[in-house]
Amino acid sequence: MNALQQAAKQEAFDLFYMDGAGFSALPNVQRAWSPLGQTHIADASLGRKRLNVLGALQYGVEPQLWYESIFGSVCAETVIGFIDRLAAQTDPTRLSVVVLDNASVHHAIPQEKRDHWLLTHRLILYFLPPYSPELNLIEIVWKHAKYHWRRFISWSADQLQPEVHALLDGFGSKYKIRFA
């Protein structure tokens, strides 16, 4: 993986780390407290609204985040559409490598579609070994967005999408990660 990252930093090709994440109207709570002897109670009715996000972290000298949000389930067609739109933004004269984990929706992409991306956009998919989320750098972006950058407040259902978009639009300017 380090060789891929070094080559991407030297602009030999474009390297994207892709995966999805879910955002809830309630902030993720890592810890809670309650008075001694009383059980902690959280109102889960506020957090039923969920926004799924597909994202691709372009690794290089200045990392960029490409993303789309979806209310509802992410299926193979959703992933294919996202990669289609990502491929259309890439330089067809340069090789692009998209790193994916082993989610079933990623492996459901037909070989004909992979061949089309390779021939038309010079884009190939690279699957990580099983059980290795630490190798997919976009996981770090999702963790920071959910646990560090997001304010610890609940959002209403109509605030969810604009708030998540504002949060992710801040990547690279307001919010930065140094990938060592």
Image (tube, grey):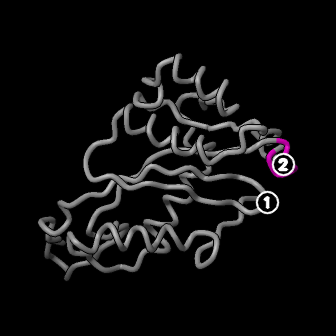
Q: Quadrant of the N terminus?
A: top right
Circle 1 Cα neighbour tier, 10 Å, few/some/many (<14 / 14–19 / ≥20): few
Determine which residue is flagged by label 2.
Answer: 11
Dot 1 falls on a residue whose secondary structure is: loop
Dot 2 falls on a residue whose secondary structure is: loop
Which residues make up the magenta segment? Answer: 8-12
Q: Are marks 2 and 1 in contact (CB under 8 Å)?
A: yes
Q: Residue at x 62, y 38 (%)?
A: 98
| In-image side of 15 versus 110 (left or right) | right
Q: Is residue 137 magenta?
A: no
Q: Give the image location of residue 4, x and y in percent.
A: 78, 39
| 79 to 72, vertically: above or below | above
Q: Residue at x 49, y 72 (%)?
A: 148
| 25 to 93, vertically: above or below | below
Which residue is at the front of the view, 7 or 101? 7
Circle 2 Cα neighbour tier, 10 Å, few/some/many (<14 / 14–19 / ≥20): some
Q: Give the image location of residue 88, x and y in percent.
A: 59, 43
Amino acid found under the numbered disc labelled 1: Val
Amino acid found under the numbered disc labelled 2: Glu
| 177 to 151, vertically: above or below | above
Q: Residue at x 43, y 74 (%)?
A: 150
Q: Residue at x 49, y 58 (%)?
A: 142
Q: Quadrant of residue 68?
A: bottom left
Q: Is residue 11 magenta?
A: yes
Determine which residue is flagged by label 1.
Answer: 61
Q: Give the image location of residue 114, x and y in percent.
A: 57, 23
User: In the orientation shown, which residue stands out farthest toward the top?
Assistant: 111
Please tell me which of labels 2 and 1 falls first in the chain: 2
Which residue is at the front of the view, 57 or 93? 93
